Amino acid sequence: MTQILPSRYLFGPGPTNPYPEATAALGYPLLGHLDPDFLQRLDNTCEGLRQAWGTANARTLPLSGTGSLGMEAAFVNTVTHGDVAVIAVNGLFGERMCDVAARCGATVIRVDHDFGQPIDPERVAAAHPNPKVIAAVHAETSTGVLSDIKTLGTLKGDALLIVDAVTSIGGSELRADDWGIDVGYAGTQKCLGVAPGLAPFTISDHAFDRRIEKPQSWYLDLGLLGGYLGDTGGGRTYHHTAPVAMVASLEAALDRILAEGLENAWQRHRSAGLQLQSGLQSMGLELFAAEGYRLPQLTTVNVPEGVDSAKVRQYLLRNFDLEIGGGVGKYAATVWRIGLMGPNASNSSVTLILGALEAAIKNAS
């Protein structure tokens, strides 16, 4: 994904960073993880995440780990041996869901789609008559595809719907309650504009009541984490040492995004992404993701025939301090992934990318 900041520092200082608050908050004097001021900060962060998720779920919190830990938490608390998990796969992270669910002992029913295509909600919902969970990726980071979670939510039946929103939260429309999302996890390093290290997580009361009572992971046991949030009725209990600096940074970023207006943030990402995609096509480049389902915050592009993908990426890094990602799996050398997320979702970023990429293709091939 793209980083267009001085010296390639992720969300570092500079004129292209509209979220200096999140970076500055990392340097606040450290509070103890049980300090009343920190607990208030945690409460503020949880409320901000409820708005970002579009949910009223009481159990909405930043888990202490990256988005992958959020994925683990989603499955370890909902499936065990003998449970059926229907999982839509249209990219790397759908595949990873299958691996994690299988490690929990679930019987995994994969519903495969071509990479670059959105999931088919009807085919996913029809894959098994009575699964414990149905899982899908909202914004597939590996392919740049946005899938229709809202429709899947209307078709889930009695299953719990687990959704990966790592790349969509803060950048695309996301309405957990309205769409029937029972368990959702995300990451901080994409459209929220915060350093990696926390997993924004939400679980509905309905899903919590159907959780595994004693999951294999003590650390990710949502029943124990309830006391950490203070929602058990007996006050807060110690569960683990929270990453206080990261929570402060996330609180600051959420405050900034909500001040901008969540829907305005979605529109900013959409506007920048559409401008980038139009510019790439004007250069004669072919987009990888299916038309109508392209992520605005992460654009996938087919590498032109005869162009060395690695050399172009190295040229961009060396000459423009600009990093774009390669594809994944069999597309590693044939697809570029260009991210416009958080601080970088701006028209000025688009102008820089288009000019730099044109120069790189010309001079590095």
Image: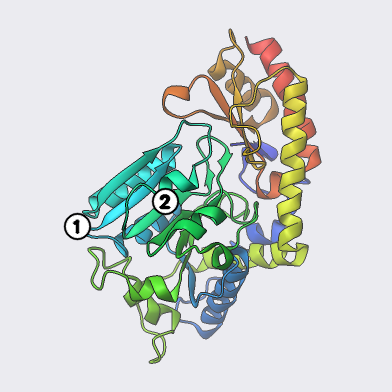
Q: Is residue 47 above or below residue 131?
A: below
Report the residue at 42% width, 46% height from top: 124
Spatial CA span between label 2 and label 1: 19 Å
- Between marks 2 and 1 in the image, the one whose residue lies nearer the viewer: 2
Residue type at tag 2: Ala
The local secondary structure at tag 1 comes to: loop
Q: Position of residue 48 (x, y in %)?
A: 61, 70
Any mark on residue 125, and which? 2
The residue wearing badge 1 is 82
Element assignment for label 2: helix
Height in image: 153 above or below 232?
above
Q: Is residue 264 visible?
A: yes
36 or 47: which is nearer to us? 47
Among the 4 quarters of the image, the one containing residue 254:
bottom right
Instruction: Classify 10 Å Cα crowding around label 1: few (below 14), some (14-19), many (20 and above).
Output: few
Classify residue 351 as left or right of residue 286: right
Q: Residue at x 62, y 27 (%)?
A: 317
Q: Which mark is residue 304?
A: none
Residue name at image x 64 percent, y 26 percent: 287
Residue at horizontal 59 percent and vertical 75 percent from the top? 47
Q: Nearer the viewer, residue 30 or 65?
A: 65
